[in-house]
């Protein structure tokens, strides 16, 4: 009887905590975006990679913030990568500011591209997902792996947790039954992984950017293609990085 009472008391103490984990909606998440620089440049510019490889870092990490009230989210960079002295690399699309409304199915994203700043207003990016049985613990949350296709040919993998009831993720990645805490785009040699999750976020910045040339996604993609088509593989990577 005494053991049964102890068990019941432990269960009563555990259930509220578990319920909070499962049904958390308001969150603040810190993400590390990691670019495998040498692998990326070797693929883009193989003919001159050997001559510049010693001036390239192996990888670089930028830090980003994601906040959400459960139905809307805002994502932006909070720390530039530390580039070692004597080395060179210009990060792709690190200045994007992404506001998503998951209820309305819309996005407002500020995308600085060289001297031009676009304000992309459109529906959320379409991603075809397939959920797998693979799991991984990220930032203290058990996550399930999914693989997806965006823009018909671009492969992406993601890890999401159903303990955070936000159908979002870093950049424009979304559409899984829970918060995406890890993402990889092999074509860009780039990953995003959560390093810290807070369930008591400051939501003051939960609002879309307003400055920039207003376009939809198709218009921006057309302008990017015109601007960068002469850059061959390098231009293709830039277009993809800016459009995620």
Image (tube, rainbow, N blue to C red):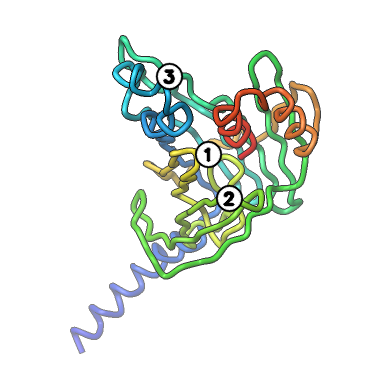
In the rendered image, residue 143, in percent from the top left (x then y), is placed at 41, 60
**Gap between marks 3 and 2, in whole Å?**
29 Å
Mark with earlier residue (1, 2):
1
First of labels 1, 3 by sequence position: 1
Q: Position of residue 205 (x, y in %)?
A: 61, 31
Residue at the spot 44% in from the left edge and 39% down from the top edge: 189
Residue at 75%, 38% in the rendered image: 217
Q: Nearer the viewer, residue 49 or 178?
A: 49
**Occupied quadrant, residue 197:** top left
Front position among marks 1 and 3: 3
Q: Position of residue 208 (x, y in %)?
A: 70, 32
Place of residue 206 in the rendered image (x, y in percent of width and height, measured from the top left): 63, 36
User: Which residue was labeled with disc 3?
Assistant: 89
Q: Secondary structure at mark 1?
A: strand
Q: Which label is found at residue 168?
A: 2
Q: Circle 3 sits in a helix, a strand or a loop, which is it? A: loop
Q: Residue furthest top?
A: 86
- The mark found on residue 84 in the picture is none
At mark 2, the secondary structure is loop
Q: Quadrant of the N terminus?
A: bottom left
- Mark in the foreground, 3 or 2: 3
Residue marked by disc 1:
66
Front-lying residue, 111 or 150? 150
Crowd band around label 3 with a 10 angstrom C-alpha radius: few (<14), some (14–19), many (20+): some
Out of 80 and 23, give the one closest to the viewer: 80
Q: Vertical placement of 189 versus 10: above or below?
A: above
């Amino acid at each position: 009887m005494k053991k049964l009472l102890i068990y019941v008391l432990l269960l009563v103490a555990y259930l509220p905590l578990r319920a909070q984990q499962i049904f958390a909606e308001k969150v603040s998440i810190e993400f590390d975006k990691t670019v495998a620089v040498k692998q990326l440049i070797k693929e883009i510019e193989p003919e001159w990679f050997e001559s510049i490889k010693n001036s390239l870092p192996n990888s670089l990490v930028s830090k980003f913030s994601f906040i959400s009230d459960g139905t809307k989210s805002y994502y932006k960079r909070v720390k530039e990568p530390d580039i070692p002295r004597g080395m060179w690399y210009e990060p792709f699309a690190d200045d994007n500011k992404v506001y998503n409304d998951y209820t309305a199915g819309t996005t407002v994203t500020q995308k600085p591209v060289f001297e031009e700043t676009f304000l992309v207003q459109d529906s959320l990016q379409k991603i075809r997902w397939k959920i797998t049985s693979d799991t991984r613990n990220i930032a203290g949350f058990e996550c399930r792996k999914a693989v997806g296709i965006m823009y018909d040919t671009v492969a992406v993998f993601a890890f999401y947790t159903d303990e955070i009831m936000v159908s979002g993720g870093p950049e424009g990645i979304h559409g899984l039954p829970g918060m995406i805490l890890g993402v990889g785009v092999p074509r860009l040699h780039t990953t995003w992984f959560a390093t810290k999750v807070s369930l008591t976020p400051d939501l003051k910045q939960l609002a879309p950017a307003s400055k920039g040339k207003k376009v939809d996604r198709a218009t921006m993609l057309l302008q990017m293609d015109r601007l960068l088509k002469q850059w061959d593989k390098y231009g293709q990577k830039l277009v993809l990085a800016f459009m995620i």
